[in-house]
Amino acid sequence: MDSTKRLFGVLFWVFTAALFAGAVVLAFAFTPDEATMGAVQKIFYVHLPVAINSFLACFVNFVASLVFLWQRRRTWDDLATAAAQVAVVLLTIVLATGMIWGRSAWGHWWTWSPRLTLSLVLWLLYVVYLVIRPSIPSAQRRAVVAAVYGAVAFLDVPLVYLSTRLMPQDVHPTEVVLAPSMRLTLGLWFLPVTLLTVGLIIVRRRALALQSQTRAVLAAAENDGPVPATIHPTGGVL
Amino acid sequence: MSRVWSQIAVLAGKDLAIEARTRQTLGLVVVLGILIIVVLGLGLGPQQMAPAPAPGMGGAAAAGATPGAAPGAAPGAAPGAAPGVAALWVAYLFAGVLCFEGSMAVERHDGALAGLLLAPVDRGVLYLAKLVTNLVLMLVLALVLTPVAVLLFGFDLSPAPGSFAAIMAISFVGLAAVGTLFAAVVSSSRLQGGLLAMAIFPVSLPLVMTSTQMLIRLFGQKSASGLSGLGILLAFDVIYLVAGWLAFELVLEP
């Protein structure tokens, strides 16, 4: 069982890496340089899929938080934490690529436009999620509080979106007309980025589960109690 | 239903009676709020927020220094509106967090929280009672801080005082709904001070964004479209009142 799992994990990452390589080749060799922005426009192929996937990670955090509050099983807490960690990484990439784009397209690193503000608030919400967790000593309470915060934070997203639209001017285009080759490349970029997101969430969840099991074993060893039998030190790569 | 109301009245009355006798939260919070407004005023610099000096008064020299701010040069533009609103919100947020923390800290002494949890009262009612307490505290806070900001930042509330009060009241309900929920976490963990602020601020950013935009439109640009964000504020209130009412029980376990 473990060896097939491991093989599957290796295949998964090799496949994802190959797709990434293909996507990079497509972006640089296949698509033409955009007329006004030149090579900087290629950021777009990374920016949009990562942005969409960061919302996906936030949504996973929301669902896992709700399921945890319903079932109170540790594994959902681990999944929610993993999703929040991945969401913060992806949102950081979104903000960084977006700022580079903004600098070359509009001349400013930052404007308080609706979508930039939305990304920034999302980033703040999930960074705070990760900061709050270690401040609560009891594992059970930490999980409950984090789950409540995760649910509350995600409920905020539509409200943030609506309130940002009250702000003046939007630099983001609402519809983009792309050349066919650009559209194909953009579509292909979605595959590896989505696989990376899903893979990272699964790997992080597994790491967190092992971490808490290790803590349980150590605590049991200190108290000379029975060692929990649930630990699998040779878990798969995934 | 009337039983719920009387329960809320008893619970909130208890908190407010304690506060009225000790004034341990309000004393601290009001001073902090005034301090924040003063610090922001000094940080922004007098040029940013000085009210346009009235002609013929001692401000003539100041008018000479900032000719662009002379009255009539920019009709309809109130220079103090945007920084004033921003300063008010920062003061409300920080002082509000201390209100929420203070009203829950009362329960930490002498096992009061355990007694409260043992009382034959629905936990949702406990949430609503704390919410009422926090709203009363914030109202007192606002009654002191708003005139201070109006004076120091020289922004004129007279065009639409009713709208200002309504926008702020609706925003306070939302802020207190979020704050009361997270303050319950504080009472039984190390999530204190700065961390409580960290939990409350990002979640309440839609309130801040919406109401500041509305107020700037109302007072700065004097346009009638200032009330277009009212739906967002009300939606925020409803969503977080329901979420807080449902989740309060979960986070309150001592």
Image: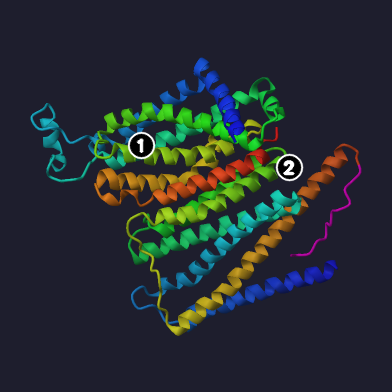
Q: In this view, does A67 lie to the left or right of B163?
A: right
Chain of the residue on which disc 1 is drawn:
B
Q: Position of residue B110 (x, y in %)?
A: 68, 20
Picture residue at 37% right of the left edge, 39% below the top:
B166
Picture residue at 46% right of the left edge, 20% below the top:
B27
| Amino acid carrying mark 2 in the image | Gln
Check disc 2: other Cα within 10 Å, few if <14, some if 14-19, many if 20+.
few
Picture residue at 42% right of the left edge, 82% below the top:
A179
Chain of the residue on which disc 2 is drawn:
A
Q: Position of residue A167 (x, y in %)?
A: 35, 54
Residue B125, numbered circle:
none
Q: Is residue B197 left or right of residue B73?
A: right
Residue B165, numbered circle:
1
Label 1 to label 2, Cα distance in Å?
42 Å
Residue A140, numbered circle:
2
Region in magenta? A226-238
User: Observer-nearest residue: B45 or B226?
Assistant: B226
Quadrant of res A194: bottom right
Residue that protrudes farthest toward the top in the picture: B21
| Amino acid carrying mark 1 in the image | Ala
Q: In this view, does B130 lie to the left or right of B228?
A: right
The C terminus of chain A - image quarter: bottom right
Q: Position of residue B133 (x, y in %)?
A: 52, 29
* Main SS of residues in magenta: loop
Magenta-drawn stretch contains A228 = yes
Residue that protrudes farthest toward the front in the picture: B2
Residue B191 in view: no
Check disc 1: other Cα within 10 Å, few if <14, some if 14-19, many if 20+.
few
